[in-house]
Amino acid sequence: MPIEREIHAEGDVVYVKAWGVDDGLEEAKEYGREVASACETNDCNLVLTDERDLKYLLSTTETYLLAQFYCEMAPKDLKVAVVCGKENYRDGAFWENVAVNRGLLFKAFVSVEEARSWLLGTG
């Protein structure tokens, strides 16, 4: 099953709800391109992605390569909060480490409320 998603913008924020299986590097890159396109189209630099229903099956190497790809593609002022399922948080935290080390404002969470608060600077 591929990565299914709904993407919409509200104000300065692109909201993403993703589900299914993240099991292919090229498909995951396409998912990222689609989110980046939504940011550009809607002139948004904030992204809140809810991936609690997305199963992560990428290898550690693929996760690293994906994070590196996103950092090369993303605008420098982009700020991304990703909400992972508890079972995927370790992979999300690894992704965060790779991304932050390359200059992307990115943080993994298991709570939508905490992610929103961090993203909007209200907490």
Image (tube, rainbow, N blue to C red):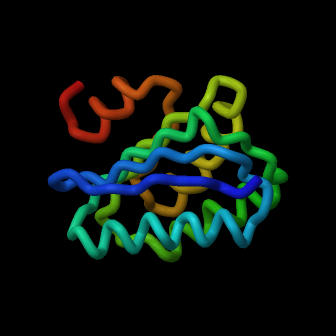
Question: Left or right: 34 with respect to 13?
Answer: right
Q: Is 47 rendered above or below residue 110? A: below
Residue 24 placement (x, y as % from top left) = 78, 62
Q: Residue at x 38, y 45 (%)?
A: 48
Residue 102 % position (x, y): 52, 62
Q: Nearer the viewer, residue 46 or 22?
A: 22
Picture quadrant of residue 81: top left
Q: Could you say where residue 95 lies in the image, as x and y percent from the top left? A: 62, 49
Lateral position of residue 31 relative to residue 21, left or right: left
- Which residue occupies 57% across, 64% down? 31
**Most extreme residue toward the left, as rendered?**
11
**Residue 18 or residue 72, whichever sits in front:** 18
Query: Front-most of 118 and 98?
Result: 118
Which residue: 72% across, 52% down?
Answer: 22
Where's the C terminus, which quadrant? top left
100 or 33, which lies in front?
33
Residue found at x 26% / y 56%: 9
Q: How many marks?
A: 0
Q: Position of residue 93 (x, y in %)?
A: 61, 38
To which quarter of the image does residue 78 belong?
bottom left
Left or right of 109: which side holds 24?
A: right
